[in-house]
Structure formats: C-alpha cells, structure tokens
Image: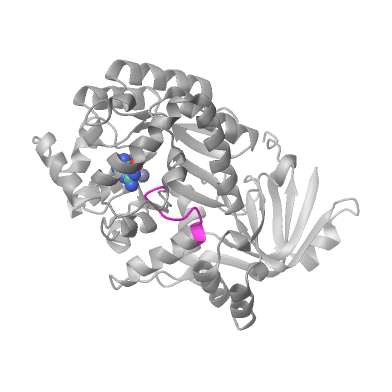
Amino acid sequence: MKQAFRASIFHCLADPGPHADASAVEHIEDGLLVVEDGRVAQVGEAGRLLSQLGDDVPVQDYRDKLIVPGLIDCHVHCPQVDIIASYGEQLLDWLNRYAYPAEMQFADEVHAREVAGFFLDELLRNGTTTAAVFATVHPHSADTLFAAAEERNMRLVGGKVLMDEHCPDALRDDPVSGYEDSKALIEKWHGRGRLGYAITPRFALTSSEAQLEAAGRLAAEYPDTWVHTHLAENQEEVDEIARQFAWSRSYLDVYDHFGLLRERSVFAHCLHLDAEDRKLMAGKGGTGAFCPTSNLFLGSGMFDLRSMTDAGVRIGLATDVGGGTSMSMLRTMSEAYKVLHLQGQSLPASRALYLATLGAAEALYLDEHIGNFAPGKEADFIVLDTGGSHITARRAAAAETLDELLFALIFLGDDRNVAATYICGATGPRRAAPADR
Ligand code: GUN
Ligand code: ZN
C-alpha cells in the first residue's frame, strides 16, 4: 500500500556537529514523504513528487506542521515510570529507596504487563518510536515488554536485568539462572519482527564476577545481540567499583575484561571516564548514552560530549526515566543543551535532533533500519505541531528560520506538540508490520 504525507520535512543525513553543518541536514519546506508498505519510498519537493503520484494514492495534508523521524531513546527503564520524580537522593540511595521497590512489584506479571503497556504508549505519545529498555530481573518482565512492543509494532531493544549481589534478595538472580533465562529470552525474542535482545547486567556493582563472566559468554555466543548497562554515573559508585574490582584499571576495564565491551554495547551515563577509557570505548565500537535530565536530577555530573565525540565514541541521547525526569526527548534535548552550555560546549538544534534520530540509530547500530528518511528505511516518523500549546504557537509565529523554530520547539515543546506518531507509516490501531524487503 502506498500513501503520502505533505508537510515541512526535516531530517539528518549525517552529524551536523557543533557548528550546525547545513549539508548534514535536509529541510523541505513544502515536502512530500511517500511511504510504501511501511517503508520510505521517496522524500522530496511536494510539487515534483505529487505530479508523479497515482491519483489513487492517499495524501495526508500536514502542510502547517513539521515531520521529523521518530525519536529514539537510547536508555530508559520501563519499571521506573511509577517512581519518576521521586525526591532528594543521589544514585545509590535512590536505587534502594525508589527504584528497587518499584522493580520488586514486577514479581506480579499482571502488574508488569500493565506498566509495559502504559510505558510504551507514553513513549509513543511523546514521539519516541524506538527505545533501548531495561526491564527487571524477572524473566516475565522482558516477555511482557516485548509482547507489548510487538503489539504496537515498535522497534525496541530490551532485556531482563542481571543482578546477583549487593541488591535486595527479591531482585536477585544467580550466574546460572541469569544466563539460562537470558538465553531463553534471546531465543524467543531476538530478531523477531522489530525486536532485539540486550544482555542487561544492571551495573558492575550488582553482579558477581561469575555473573559478569556468564554475561560475557552470552555476548560472545550471540554477537548480534546488544549489551546494555550503566557506567561511571556517580562518584560514590565509581569509588565502590575501584574497591570491588581492585585489579581493574578503570570501571570500563571491568566490562572490557569480561567481554562486555563490543559493538552494540550501550553504556548509560559515562560521566567519569578518562582519555584511555574513551579511546578504548571508541576502538571497540561501544556506545555512550547521554542522559541529561537524569544526570542533573540525581546530581551525578555533566556529560562531556566534546571529549566523547572527539575520541570517536558513538553517542545517543536518552531519558533514563525514572532517574530522568521526562519521557519527552524534546525536554531531554533542552537539558542536554544546558549541560553542554555550562561546560562551554554548544548544541545547535539540528545536532540535538541528530542525537535523538540518526545519531541515536547509529549509536544503537540500527541505522540501516531507522533514523532518517533514506528510501528503504522503516517509515517511523512524527508530526510536530507548533499549535500544541499557547507558548509554542506564539514563539513559532515569531521564528524566521527553521533552526529558530526547531530550537524553540526543543525548549518549549512536549507531548502536546506531537500531533501524531507513525510506526511504519501507520498510527494507532492501524500500525502494521513492515513488508519484507
Ligand atoms: N545504575 C544502576 N542501576 C541504575 C538505575 O536504575 N538508574 C540509574 N540512573 N543508574 C543506575
Ligand atoms: Zn539507567
């Protein structure tokens, strides 16, 4: 089935960098996005493409709105939606006081299913079409998450958490059960439709060496799965790692030692790294997830984007809800701007969008499928409406360039400005699986 969408269209072709390289983006003021069987067929000037389009092809008119690729959240916790914005602690106390109790409730599969549905619908309402997601230690938490994503036809990377020490008994697995359960989940879900499995050791503090070794074994046995964990978020955590793994050169060295640093390894935070770590991460193809709302909320520190990108590390933006304080990638982009501004670094609107679309897709090794409107990619996109709130409507009316408009939307916009979210060219219940290529 062929369909077309007429709007102002913006997407990235490459990294615009800190100086907003205009050749890295494409903006078509009066554009047409042509979708066939759930994939991008063409994108270009409406005037030209409409004349070639058959009369029978439906054209959705979004001429007063802006179409951009679906947003990608590189690190977020499904079970933590219920404790988002919980007062007053830094990481280790916050985990004990808020995160772990919320995750314990996932022992109840009915609860896990209900939260997963809410969580994914909330992502979609905010314009996020793909995410890399932590479930809980319970295997059924991954089953319910994947089933909910499959129902919505979302491209999603997720996994059951591995944790076998320094955590509540109710959230503990062990090296053997964690390995076996993860393996069974990989066999069941990895590569099924748009789903991918992430081997998910929570962080090195909550896994024994035997468990990290088992996780590394799985990562080697299934090289096209993801590895998803936390790295160097909080100074107290980093100090504890140095005590627990006294043999290691650094926190990253612990993961590397156990074979957990490779292509498709996603490390949330990466705040307290040195030049050697950055070089190692870049060389092995690891990814850093930049989680600005979380880093500010938990008082963890400031992400050094310039040093990471100069070293050649792949970077994607992430909410890290519930340490993060918003499901909205627009809000997340605006906080990223502030974190960088405080360090004398810049984040133009086009690059902020890159870090949540094509850059995030590259960071997750998903750019052959999603991230921009290159023909053949899956047609995940959102329709942004400056009329979503009074302040965005007023500010948009005064904007003279697309850059100015985008920047204002990033700062003032939220879910009210996401008029529609399309998954493979479909909204709501019409969302269907993409045709095979
Ligand atoms: N480090 C280990 N677990 C977590 C978590 O749930 N959230 C955050 N922000 N950091 C972590
Ligand atoms: Zn996290």
In this orientation, which residue lies closer to the viewer: 357 or 369?
357
Residue 325 shown in magenta: yes
Q: Answer with the quadrant where ligand 1 appears in the image.
A: top left
Residue 240, x across and y down, in percent: 14, 41
User: Which residue is at 85% across, 62% downward?
Assistant: 51
Q: Say which quadrant the N terminus sits in.
A: top right
Does residue 54 sit above or below 209 in this rendering? below
Q: Classify residue 136 by image quadrant.
A: top left
In this orientation, which residue lies closer to the viewer: 300 or 60?
300
- By secondary structure, the bulk of the magenta-drawn segment is best described as loop
Residue 285, x across and y down, in percent: 34, 43
User: Which residue is at 54% across, 27% downward?
Assistant: 110
In this orientation, which residue lies closer to the viewer: 269 or 415?
415
In this orientation, which residue lies closer to the viewer: 164 or 41?
164
User: Which residue is at 59% across, 40% downward?
Assistant: 154
Does residue 191 sit above or below 315 in this rendering? above
**Stretch in magenta:** 321-330
Residue 21, x across and y down, in percent: 47, 70
Residue 35, x across and y down, in percent: 73, 49
Does residue 171 sit above or below 331 in this rendering? above
Residue 223 in sight from this viewpoint: yes
* Direction right: furthest residue: 55
**352 with respect to 45 (left or right):** left
**331 with respect to 46 (left or right):** left
User: Which residue is at 46% across, 43% downward?
Assistant: 82
